[in-house]
């Protein structure tokens, strides 16, 4: 023990500390500032550490573990440093599996700490004695047990370093209960390091620059990892200096702000069908991007595809690519620009103005078509009308979260964020139920921003009880339910395949708003399209968790071009 200037006793690295303190010190060093959990004795030392160490760490205790892990995952997405969820042994841990899988699919930095039955009883059948790490091995970057109290700090340090280094993702650590309560010297404090940026291969950059220089109709796709890798400034600069048309997905949305003349997401099919080169950066060549095949319809020559990822393991192995690169994505964009404009490349800057104008004409036509839906007077309400009312009320720094089926697909079509890092969707794992945790995280990470959670009514049922957590922790968010009284995104396809549907209807016009009111928030039901806007205004003004429950037309299904299969 030493004393600080105020004469307070400060632990030295030689003073024994209990396992919770050792674990939380490492988490803090890696930037964690909130702990999400649901109580269980196996993990009490983490709570004791959060309460007793200076400064105390806020504990957000939820009503169902998935919400805790979805919240921690969303902290990772929003802040780009790993979020922390602490789950009690056995069922607490297994309740977190879907959210960890989502983090793995989305490349979200996340550390989950699990309790674990004590070593001194292992094999004898103590409560919740389950060997967790094998369960997470296929959905995490690392999944391991800190077998002794002395292992806790180094194991946590490695988990955070892995989770926060590209390609980011979840890491799981469990700690036997007796060792969690046990004490050990802290050892060397964690520096909170992540791995050093990797320079993309200059030959690969030159090859991509040559493809781009000779392309007449290129399209650049910006995905989640451009944001996660903090490459949004370099990406926008590249876009502006080259004039290349852009389409974005996931957390890549907003890097090129909504309304920017080069953002052609609304002309997506023309752009992909007619492009001669598609450069995809920071997102997998999965079902959302036609598995990396662009154009080639009716005998036309398909576009050449370039895939660029934050790390070698993310580069597509299934697609037929003309070139690939991997490494730090800011270095990729600056390096590609240098290669494109180098004297050896004849200094000729390509002119894609005619191609861009074609796409801009399409964007204008699509925008005009959208306006009809956004202002629809239909009764029952067309879900698009909700976005017609919401969009003009959104501030540039709003965080918009989608959790649902068709209702959220409409959001993806209509909401074009003005800034990056303000759009959270389920990503390629497509897990319903993630929205409430994400809304909690957004409220915490962006205290002065609007936070809007767009819920399908089916999805709302998966997490709405955690409004209780929003209320207890004073986390006001605006929830808008597109209530078509159905699992709409399944009802339509089942009708299409079988001519009938089953297991797709929900109770008609359920008062989800009254659920929120009962839990201490506010809400109202809306059946008249003209009442949507005023209800959203009241929700924003309320300063409490508030749910606007809009009855929508179940027959207004999202016009889907892909099935994801
Ligand atoms: C955890 C989970 N369970 C089931 C599904 C399958 N699923 C995808 S969309 C959907 C319907 C969603 O209904 P709702 O939230 O009401 O939105 P809507 O399509 O009606 O707008 C379902 C059940 C899923 N993606 N995730
Ligand atoms: Mg629904």
Image (spheres, rainbow, N blue to C red):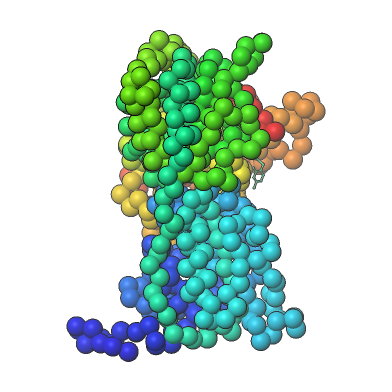
Q: Residue at x 37, y 53 (%)?
A: 445
Q: Is residue 69 above or below residue 275?
A: below
Q: Is residue 491 above or below residue 541?
A: above
Name the residue nearer the viewer: 192 or 339: 339
> What x and y, as percent, mark residue 390?
41, 33
Q: Residue at x 58, y 51 (%)?
A: 104
Horizontally, residue 269 falls left or right of residue 229, namely right
Locate the C terminus and report the quarter of the image it occupies: top right
Q: Residue at x 74, y 28 (%)?
A: 495
In the current view of this chain or complex, which residue is farthest to the bottom? 1
Q: Residue at x 38, y 17 (%)?
A: 350
Q: Quadrant of ligand 1?
A: top right
Tell me which corner region of the image, top left, top right, bottom left or bottom right, holds residue 130.
bottom right
> What x and y, as percent, mark residue 254?
39, 35
Name the residue nearer the viewer: 168 or 496: 168
Horizontally, residue 455 falls left or right of residue 246, namely right
Horizontally, residue 128 falls left or right of residue 314, namely right
């Amino acid at each position: 023990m030493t004393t600080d200037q105020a004469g307070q006793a400060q632990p030295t690295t030689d003073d024994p500390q209990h396992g919770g303190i050792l674990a939380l010190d490492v988490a803090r060093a890696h930037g964690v500032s909130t702990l999400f959990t649901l109580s269980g004795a196996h993990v009490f030392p983490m709570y004791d550490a959060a309460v007793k160490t200076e400064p105390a760490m806020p504990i957000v205790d939820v009503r169902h573990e998935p919400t805790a892990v979805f919240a921690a995952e969303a902290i990772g997405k929003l802040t780009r440093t790993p979020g922390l969820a602490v789950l009690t042994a056995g069922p607490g841990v297994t309740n977190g599996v879907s959210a960890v899988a989502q983090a793995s699919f989305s490349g979200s930095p996340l550390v989950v700490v699990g309790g674990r039955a004590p070593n001194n009883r292992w094999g004898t059948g103590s409560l919740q004695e389950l060997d967790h790490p094998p369960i997470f091995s296929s959905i995490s970057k690392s999944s391991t047990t800190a077998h002794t109290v002395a292992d806790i700090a180094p194991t946590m340090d490695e988990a955070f370093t892995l989770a926060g280094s590209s390609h980011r993702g979840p890491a799981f650590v469990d700690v036997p209960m007796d060792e969690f309560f046990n004490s050990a010297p802290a050892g060397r404090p964690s520096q909170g390091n992540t791995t050093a940026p990797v320079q993309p291969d200059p030959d690969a950059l030159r090859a991509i620059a040559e493809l781009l220089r000779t392309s007449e109709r290129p399209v650049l796709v910006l995905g989640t990892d451009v944001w996660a890798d903090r490459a949004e400034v370099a990406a926008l600069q590249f876009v502006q200096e080259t004039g290349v048309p852009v389409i974005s997905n996931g957390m890549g949305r907003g890097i090129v702000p909504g309304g920017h003349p080069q953002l052609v997401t609304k002309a997506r099919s023309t752009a992909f069908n007619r492009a001669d080169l598609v450069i995809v950066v920071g997102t997998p060549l999965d079902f959302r991007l036609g598995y990396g095949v662009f154009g080639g319809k009716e005998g036309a020559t398909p576009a050449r595809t370039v895939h660029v990822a934050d790390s070698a393991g993310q580069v597509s192995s299934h697609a037929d690519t003309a070139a690939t690169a991997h490494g730090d994505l800011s270095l990729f964009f600056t390096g590609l620009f240098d290669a494109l404009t180098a004297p050896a490349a004849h200094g000729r800057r390509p002119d894609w103005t005619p191609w861009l104008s074609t796409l801009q004409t399409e964007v204008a036509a699509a925008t005009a078509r959208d306006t009809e839906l956004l202002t629809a007077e239909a009764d029952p309400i067309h879900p698009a009308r909700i976005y017609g009312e919401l969009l003009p009320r959104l501030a540039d720094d709003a965080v918009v979260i989608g959790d649902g089926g068709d209702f959220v697909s409409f959001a993806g079509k209509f909401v074009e964020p003005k800034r990056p890092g303000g759009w959270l969707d389920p990503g390629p794992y497509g897990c319903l139920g993630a929205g409430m945790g994400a809304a909690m995280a957004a409220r915490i990470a962006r205290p002065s921003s609007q936070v809007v959670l767009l819920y399908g009514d089916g999805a709302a049922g998966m997490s709405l009880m955690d409004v209780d957590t929003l209320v207890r922790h004073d986390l006001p968010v605006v929830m808008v339910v597109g209530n078509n009284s159905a699992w709409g995104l399944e009802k339509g396809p089942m009708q299409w395949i079988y001519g009938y549907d089953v297991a797709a209807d929900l109770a008609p016009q359920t008062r989800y708003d009254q659920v929120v009111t009962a839990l201490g928030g506010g809400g109202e039901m809306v059946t008249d399209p003209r009442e949507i806007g005023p209800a959203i205004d009241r929700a924003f003004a309320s300063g409490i968790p508030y749910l606007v429950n809009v009855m929508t037309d179940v027959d207004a299904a999202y016009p889907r071009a892909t099935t994801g299969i």
